[in-house]
Amino acid sequence: MRFYPFFWDSNMWFGKIDSVERWLNMLTHVMRSEADLDRILEAKMAPVLEVDELPKDYFLGNMGVVAGDLRSFGFRREHIPGTVKLEDWAKVRGMDLRAMAKRKASA
């Protein structure tokens, strides 16, 4: 299975997620319960116009977000007007992030 990278941005954890291992690592920092997983998967993608309004160093040198090559999901201000949820975005690309998290939790 191919993993499509994205950027995660919240107060508890931020960075590029480019593998299943990195996804699961992020969850260990952010997820405390099943409800947290639901909240994470419902996080919205920051619209490009919102990203364009931010200072170029806002994503700590991750120019893929600034250039529009790397989608950014999370809970920060630029994500609020978003309409695409992380889980939906991933499923369209053949990635079941929920199943990955549940396999890890049951292991």
Image (tube, grey):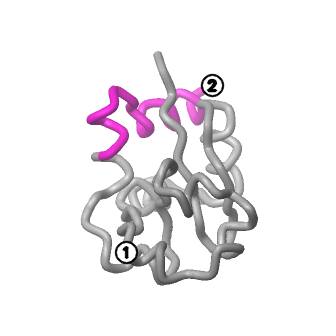
Q: How many marks?
A: 2
The residue beneath circle 2 is: 107
The residue beneath circle 1 is: 49
| Nearest to the observer: residue 51 or residue 40 | 51
- At label 2, the amino acid type is Ala
Residue 103: where, in percent of width, then height?
Answer: 52, 27
Residue drawn at x 28%, y 59% is 84
Residue drawn at x 68%, y 69% is 12
The quadrant of the image that shows the C terminus is top right
The magenta stretch spans residue 9: no
Identify the image quadrant of residue 22. Answer: top right
Residue drawn at x 49%, y 48% is 69
Residue 25: assigned label:
none
41 above or below 107? below
| Nearest to the observer: residue 101 or residue 106 | 101
Q: What stretch is highlighted in magenta?
A: 89-107
Residue 5: where, in percent of width, then height?
Answer: 54, 39
The magenta stretch spans residue 91: yes
Disc 1 packing (10 Å; few <14; some 14–19; many ≥20): few
Residue 2: where, in percent of width, then height?
Answer: 48, 20
Q: How far apart are marks 1 and 2 (CA)?
A: 41 Å
Instruction: Say what secondary structure mark 2 lies in.
Output: loop
Q: Main secondary structure of the magenta part?
A: helix
